[in-house]
Amino acid sequence: MSDLKWKGNWNVVKGKVKQEYADLTDDDLMYEEGQEDELIGRLQQRTGKARDEVVDWLNSL
């Protein structure tokens, strides 16, 4: 998972994600170290994007 650039700046990225997808809840965006796959899975379900799309999107924020 070393390709995840947003791990250190999650609070900033979380704010940008909420601006783009206002219907996402804090529970949807809960991030804990080591549980990146769960977060990405929740975002996939809520946004309808593929895993690679979610990771690329998060890395671009």
Image (cartoon, helix red, strand yellow):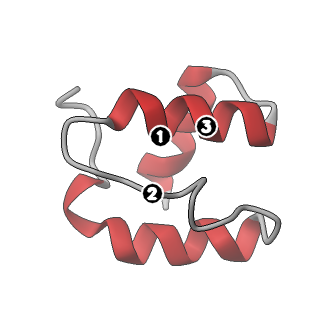
Instruction: Find residue 51 and report its horizontal and vertical position in percent.
Output: 57, 22
Label 3 sits on residue = 42
Q: Against 53, is 14 above or below?
A: below
Mark 1 touches mark 2? (CB < 8 Å) = yes
Query: Of marks 1 and 2, which one's residue comes earlier in the chain?
Result: 2
Mark 2: give few (<14), some (14-19) or many (20+) Cα within 10 Å.
some
Q: Residue at x 19, y 62 (%)?
A: 8
Tell me which numbered mark, 2 or 3, is placed earlier along the sequence: 2
Q: Would residue 51 appear left or right of 46 to someone viewing this image?
A: left
Question: Residue 24: where, in percent of width, then height?
Answer: 72, 61
Q: Nearer the viewer, residue 2 or 42?
A: 42
- CA gap between label 1 and label 2 equals 7 Å
* Residue closer to the observer: 8 or 3: 8
> Which residue is tagged 1?
39
Q: Residue at x 77, y 41 (%)?
A: 46
Residue depicted at x 63% and y 41%: 43
Instruction: Give coordinates of residue 20: x percent, y percent.
Output: 74, 68
Label 3: how many Cα within 10 Å (few below 14, some 14–19, many 20+) = some
Discs 1, 3 touching: Cβ within 8 Å: yes
Q: Give the CA distance from mark 2 to mark 3.
A: 10 Å
Outermost residue, front direction? 27
Residues tagged 2 and 3 counted as in contact (Cβ below 8 A): no
Residue tagged by mark 2? 30
36 on left or right of 8 = right
